[in-house]
Image (spheres, coloured by chain):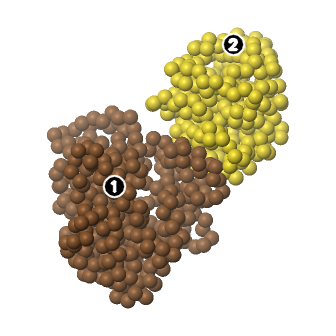
């Protein structure tokens, strides 16, 4: 079991209740670059601390939003590739279906992998619906494009005998020849997020790490789709390191303080889902059947978030979020036992992605959280336990 | 469809196409807007009193099949060239509304064979304005209520009780929206090549534009009209972007009048 520290690198001062949409159209005049510089430095310091203390590192990217002020995951990854010593560097991930240039993606990844001496974990995501409006290409046929971009990135990284041409349906290139050669052979590990049985099957077929976010105790079903796909293919049961889950951690020596931190983090989550109406359901993102259902539900505002659980995430009480396996809150003992229970429930988990900083949480609080998780939670979760063996 | 008899499905040029055929005589090919064929029924029935109306749902729209690889309005225009040949249409009047007008304009830049008149109702598809701003309201970035206000003088001709719509109508709406994104997402509602090809339209052309169009402004329509040699421009009073829906009688009279008005062909005057 590995634990990855994660922050969305938010710009929390930039939003106010009057902003109807924290995404796509929020003017950047709401961002004070001097404050944001402090934020970036703090987050980088926190990741470097995580590296020192034995945690791993996760970065993500979003666009045109104050909730995640990291539009280019390659930038912090590149800094951390040089400044850290041992942590795995996970990006989860690159929205490759929205990118125009998969070869450039391969070049960024290759350089980060080499500078970090082989510590890159290469996460690829479809991206959230409300980022489609920012994309040059629509969501129609997005998954086709995703897989073609994936195929091209992998081929570009693994072709070491000179240039090749790519004349695909979505991408056309002359003389693809990525330098440097990647450090991890044949290529860095691939992670892909998935929710639908079909998508999870495609991830399982390739033997990649399945990424899941805030899906709580529904996560077991998602992992089961993966296990079933392996069984159908006649392969052995997948090891826990094929599974990852992102949850929110609010931890302190004192339970009351942990609850206060949880309130800070959840307050951020409650506002981060605010997206103006036309951006929530871009055409082509959902199946025609689901899109038809959303037209029918017009005005009910049940469609601005994709996942059923996401509604809970944005509005649930902390106690409920803990019960749902979305938040892990309390003393190191509390968080350890909550996580252990979750790991048992899902049948084994190789990678826990910890949102350990969110919203207005201070640098000092984040440092305290990272320290407690690294020193008091991770070692206990890494000990072999009868219960988890049984479940696996 | 808001008419007594529904459309049928026919295999045309290898594609299963939902198609409505009405009336007899001179053929009129009606190309529906991006919102689909719903709301165009009264206009079609009115035309059909004096002509033969052929009103397909475009590939990907309504219940028409989307062939793999079809992804541009250029592709759609080639499909319609096949359709015109396969149905052996001659002396044809092509009438296109909004997105359908874009297809119609692309068809007419490619051939004058079999075509005799072109009617563009609030047509989109060419770029005339500044690069910093879309000429056409961005349907994908505008709340639905606001889009309705901009597009209709009276949205009642369009609005439906979504709650009680049958599944297949909801499916058609969802497919229309998805197909619009496929064909018109970016560049939004235009083909960068089309403006430079408009001079090739050499059949008599009539623009009809809603006087209250808040979706594609009249100034845009006039720029479009000026780019097609000899094209005429008429405003339709008391109408937004879809005058054939809001003023079906007036628009049908314009179309029938223009179709029947046969001075020397423009080509003959040269």
What x and y, as percent, mark residue A190? 27, 53
Q: Does A289 sit above or below residue A254?
A: above
Viewer-proximal residue, A369 or A204? A204
Residue at left offset 29%, top offset 53%: A227
* Residue depicted at x 58% and y 14%: B85
Look at the image and give the colour of chain A: brown
Number of numbered callouts drawn: 2
> Element under label 2?
loop
> Can you tell which chain is drawn yellow?
B
Q: Which residue is mark 1?
A: A224
Visible residue check, residue B179: yes
Left or right relative to A310: residue B54: right
Residue at 41% from the left image edge and 54% from the top image edge: A195
The answer to whether residue A125 is seen in the rendering is no
In screen coordinates, is A19 left or right of A359? right
Nearer the observer, A219 or B29 = A219
Figure quadrant of the N terminus of chain B: top right
Q: Position of residue B7 (x, y in %)?
A: 67, 26
Q: Which residue is mark 2?
A: B91
């Amino acid at each position: 079991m590995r634990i990855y520290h994660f922050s969305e690198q938010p710009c929390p001062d930039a939003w106010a209740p009057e902003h109807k949409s924290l995404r796509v159209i929020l003017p950047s005049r709401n961002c004070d670059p001097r404050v944001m510089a402090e934020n970036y430095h703090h987050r980088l310091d926190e990741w470097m601390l995580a590296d020192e203390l034995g945690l791993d590192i996760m970065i993500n990217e979003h666009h045109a939003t104050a909730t995640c002020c990291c539009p280019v995951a390659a930038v912090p990854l590149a800094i951390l590739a040089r400044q850290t010593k041992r942590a795995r560097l996970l990006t989860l991930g690159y929205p490759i279906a929205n990118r125009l240039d998969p070869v450039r993606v391969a070049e960024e990844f290759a350089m980060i992998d080499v500078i970090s001496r082989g510590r890159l974990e290469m996460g690829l995501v479809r991206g959230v619906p409300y980022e489609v409006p920012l994309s040059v290409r629509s969501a129609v046929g997005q998954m086709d494009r995703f897989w073609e971009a994936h195929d091209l990135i992998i081929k570009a990284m693994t072709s070491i005998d000179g240039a090749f041409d790519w004349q695909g349906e979505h991408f056309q290139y002359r003389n693809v020849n990525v330098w440097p050669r990647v450090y991890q052979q044949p290529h860095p590990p691939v992670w892909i997020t998935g929710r639908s049985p079909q998508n999870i099957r495609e991830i399982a077929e390739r033997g990649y790490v399945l990424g899941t976010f805030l899906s709580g105790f529904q996560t077991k079903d998602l992992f089961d789709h993966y296990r079933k796909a392996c069984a159908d293919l006649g392969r052995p049961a997948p090891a826990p390191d094929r599974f990852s889950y992102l949850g929110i951690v609010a931890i302190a020596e004192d339970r009351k303080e942990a609850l206060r931190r949880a309130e800070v983090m959840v307050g951020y989550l409650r506002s981060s889902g605010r997206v103006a109406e036309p951006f929530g359901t871009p055409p082509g993102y959902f199946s025609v059947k689901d899109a038809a259902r959303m037209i029918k539900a017009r005005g009910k505002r049940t469609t601005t978030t994709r996942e059923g659980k996401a509604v809970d995430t944005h509005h649930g009480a902390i106690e409920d979020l803990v019960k749902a396996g979305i938040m892990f809150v309390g003393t190191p003992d509390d968080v350890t036992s909550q996580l252990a229970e979750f790991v048992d429930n899902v049948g084994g988990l190789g990678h826990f992605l910890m949102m350990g900083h969110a919203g207005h949480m201070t640098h000092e609080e984040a440092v305290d959280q990272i320290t407690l998780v690294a020193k008091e939670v991770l070692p206990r979760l890494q000990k072999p336990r009868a219960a988890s063996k049984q479940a696996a | 469809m808001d008419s007594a008899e529904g459309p049928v499905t026919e295999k045309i040029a290898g594609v299963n196409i939902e198609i409505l055929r009405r009336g007899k005589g001179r053929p009129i090919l009606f190309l529906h807007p991006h919102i689909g064929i719903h709301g165009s029924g009264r206009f079609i029935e009115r035309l059909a009193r004096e002509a033969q109306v052929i009103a397909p749902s475009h590939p990907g729209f309504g219940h028409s099949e989307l062939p793999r690889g079809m992804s541009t309005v250029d592709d759609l225009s080639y499909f319609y060239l096949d359709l015109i040949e396969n149905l052996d249409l001659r002396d044809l009047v092509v009438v296109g509304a909004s997105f359908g007008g874009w297809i119609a304009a692309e068809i007419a830049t490619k051939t004058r064979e079999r075509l005799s008149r072109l009617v563009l109702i609030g047509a989109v598809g060419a770029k005339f304005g500044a690069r910093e701003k879309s000429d056409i309201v961005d349907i994908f970035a505008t709340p639905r209520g606001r889009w309705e206000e901009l597009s209709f003088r009276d949205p009642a001709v369009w609005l439906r009780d979504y709650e009680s719509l049958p599944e297949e109508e909801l499916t058609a709406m969802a497919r229309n929206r998805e197909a619009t994104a496929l064909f018109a997402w970016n560049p939004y509602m235009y083909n960068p090549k089309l403006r430079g090809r408009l001079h090739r339209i050499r059949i008599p052309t009539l623009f009809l534009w809603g006087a209250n169009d808040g979706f594609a402004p009249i100034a845009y329509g006039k720029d479009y009209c000026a780019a097609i040699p000899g094209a005429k421009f008429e405003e339709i009073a008391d109408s937004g972007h879809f005058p054939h829906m809001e003023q079906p009688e007036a628009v049908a009279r314009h179309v029938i009048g223009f179709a029947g008005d046969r001075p020397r062909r423009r080509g003959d005057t040269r």
